[in-house]
Image (cartoon, rainbow, N blue to C red):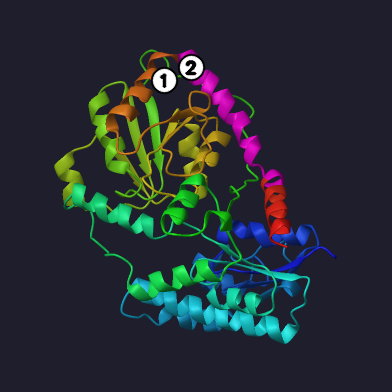
Amino acid sequence: MNPRHWHVAHLAARDYYSVPRFLHERGRLAGFYTDFWLPSPLSRFEQLLGRMSGRYHPELPGSMVRAENFRSLFRHFKTGSSVFADWVRIGKDFAERAAADIVRRGLRPDHGILAYTSGSLELLELAAAHEIPGVHVQIDPGPAWYRTRAAELRLWPGAESDPGMPDAAYLDRVQAEWRAASMIIVNSNHSADSLIDEGVPREKVRIVPLGSNLVPLPNPLVAPTKGEPLRILFAGSVSVAKGFPYLAEAARMLGKGFELHAAGGNRLHRDFIDEKQWPVRFHGHVSRARLSELMRSSHVLVFPTLSDGFGLVQLEAMAHGLPVIATPCCGGVVEDGLSGFVVAPRSAEAIADRLQRLRADPALLTRMSRNALARIGAFDAATTAGMLMETLDAAA
């Protein structure tokens, strides 16, 4: 049988278009369907909509891409009763139109369809009707993530506005996507376990970690001098679901000799932060260049998330030579005791203990920095692309 060619469909610039790029490089991409696509990185359209500046990649020829820019703008400007209702409406319209386009262009027995959360159902149903593989990529741990956030908001009253749980229509759509798929790809053991707990058959689920083209710095970081603080970095959404309050509490426990910086949009209420008086310097949302500067000036990244599909920031930090302290509720990047530490979720004490170890032992910090630089090789784009191709070939 000829190698299977894949139609890929996803909203947004998911992982910088890594999956369609991988397939195109190997001559296995039948077509790519997305919401926005720019004809070049310097187009007038991009200049008018600066936030869409990433909606282009030179490795994907325009002839392989199908997008409806103006219809997609209309989809996003038309809002419904809730964000979840919008996700259902947008995902359904996107998947229906992508499926219709695939049918018009011709669907062959050696094709397959790969699509992503909330925008895959109609495409997966098309695949099933034509008896070809329909692969669903779950971008997060599913409904369990929302339950985790809701529980955490009860533990930290007044921390954030409560957006509520997803409505039935959204949950029904996600579960219908799981049922329609012949295979489900997730990026971590944590996501796999979350879906299996929701009733997804274990044999349907495959784990393929995210990859990266990051180039590691040539040298490990320099441990802080005797009078210099250990600089700790948090990067991501400053929120309860990311476990930020536990890191902030750890910083309070540690006191002098430690300096905590937080880069990322802040979901916590200002009066809540003022009440806690945590020793944190908040940088707010920063550019990629500024984040790189913060990583170069830090000694360790802490990623205390309570639920994540993967957490690419771990790889970004390791490329800068930073050991990472993470929970097991994300992609398995950190090798405990080698390239950082894995700690129990919701444990400020465990975070403080590991940070104290790094501050007290410069040789340990340097050794972990070297191991972190080496670790990202396991997640380079070529390696993870090979894993993806093996997984998709198994779906055939």
Q: Position of residue 382 (x, y in %)?
A: 72, 46
Distance from label 2 to label 1 (Cα)? 6 Å
Above/below status of 47 relative to 377: below
- Label 1: few (<14), some or many (≥20) within 10 Å? many
Residue 309 in sight in this render: no
Q: Which residue is mark 2?
A: 364
Q: Work out whether mark 2 precedes mark 1 in sequence or the reverse, and give the earlier one.
A: 1
- Whether residues under marks 2 and 1 lie with C-beta atoms below 8 angstroms apart, the answer is yes
- Residue 41, located in which quarter of the rendered image? bottom right
Which amino acid type is shown beneath numbered disc 1? Leu
Q: From the image, which quarter does the C terminus lie in?
A: bottom right
Q: Residue furthest right?
A: 1
Above/below status of 245 relative to 269: above
The residue range painted magenta reads 362-383
| Residue 138 part of the magenta segment | no
Q: Residue furthest left?
A: 275
Residue 285 in sight in this render: yes
Q: Residue at x 34, y 73 (%)?
A: 168
Q: Position of residue 222 (x, y in %)?
A: 51, 21
Q: Nearer the viewer, residue 198 or 72?
A: 198
Above/below status of 330 relative to 100: above
| Residue 371 part of the magenta segment | yes
Q: From the image, which quarter does the N terminus lie in?
A: bottom right
Q: Nearer the viewer, residue 125 or 17?
A: 125
Q: Position of residue 231 (x, y in %)?
A: 39, 28
Q: Position of residue 310 (x, y in %)?
A: 50, 48
Which amino acid type is shown beneath numbered disc 2? Leu
Q: Which residue is mark 1?
A: 358
Which element is circle 1 on?
A: helix
Give the left or right position of residue 351, taking residue 309 as reference: left
Which element is circle 2 on?
A: helix
Principal secondary structure, stretch drawn in magenta? helix
